[in-house]
Image (cartoon, rainbow, N blue to C red):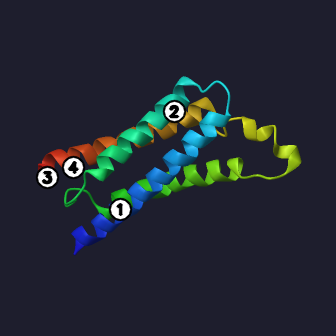
Amino acid sequence: MEAVGVAASIAGLLSLVIQLTQISVNFASKVSGASKTQTEYIGELKALQSVLAKFKDADAVSTATVDSYKLQIERVRTRLEKKFTRNSPLSGLKNLTWPFEEAEMARVVEMLHRLQSILHSSLSVDGL
């Protein structure tokens, strides 16, 4: 039964990562001069999306692990969405800036990379 829960969590996480990738690419295209960290961030999202898409049987990873990372990724998405969808005329100039400081973005990149590593290791253990 745990495998069904994990599979559902992975499917939800994949959906979230796809949404976040789309929002991030769209946002980054509107911000001039993407930094190295922003580029790495989008690369990690795409790599994570690729690893998540390979999951069919996910017994080697726990629902708690997946849900923990899902919560962190949802926070990033929420912050980007808030910044990207502001409609106030005075916020127009603010919307042209990336909503994360470099150090904060580096932590997000590290988190995405850790999750990708965990999932990739799980795929290797399961022989997928």
Of residues 126 and 31, which is closer to you in this image? 31
State the mark number for residue 11.
Answer: 1
Residue 3 percent across, percent down from the top left: 22, 68
Of marks 1 and 2, which one's residue comes earlier in the chain? 1
Residue under the point 50% across and 53% down: 19
Amino acid carrying label 3: it is: Asp
Is residue 92 visible to us here?
yes
The secondary structure type at the circle numbered 2 is helix
Residue under the point 42% across and 53% down: 69
Outermost residue on the right side: it is 90
Mark 2 closeness class: few <14, some 14–19, many ≥20 residues within 10 Å: some
Amino acid carrying label 1: it is: Ala
Residue 26 percent across, percent down from the top left: 59, 42
The reply to whether callout 2 and callout 3 are in contact (CB within 8 Å) is: no
State the mark number for residue 116.
Answer: none
The reply to whether callout 3 and callout 4 are in contact (CB within 8 Å) is: yes
Identify the residue under disc 4: 122
The reply to whether callout 4 and callout 2 are in contact (CB within 8 Å) is: no
The secondary structure type at the circle numbered 1 is helix
Identify the residue under disc 3: 126
Amino acid carrying label 4: it is: Ser
Residue under the point 40% across and 58% down: 13
State the mark number for residue 106.
Answer: 2
Amino acid carrying label 2: it is: Ala
Using the rendered view, name the quadrant where residue 110 is placed.
top left
Of marks 2 and 3, which one's residue comes earlier in the chain? 2
The reply to whether callout 1 and callout 4 are in contact (CB within 8 Å) is: no
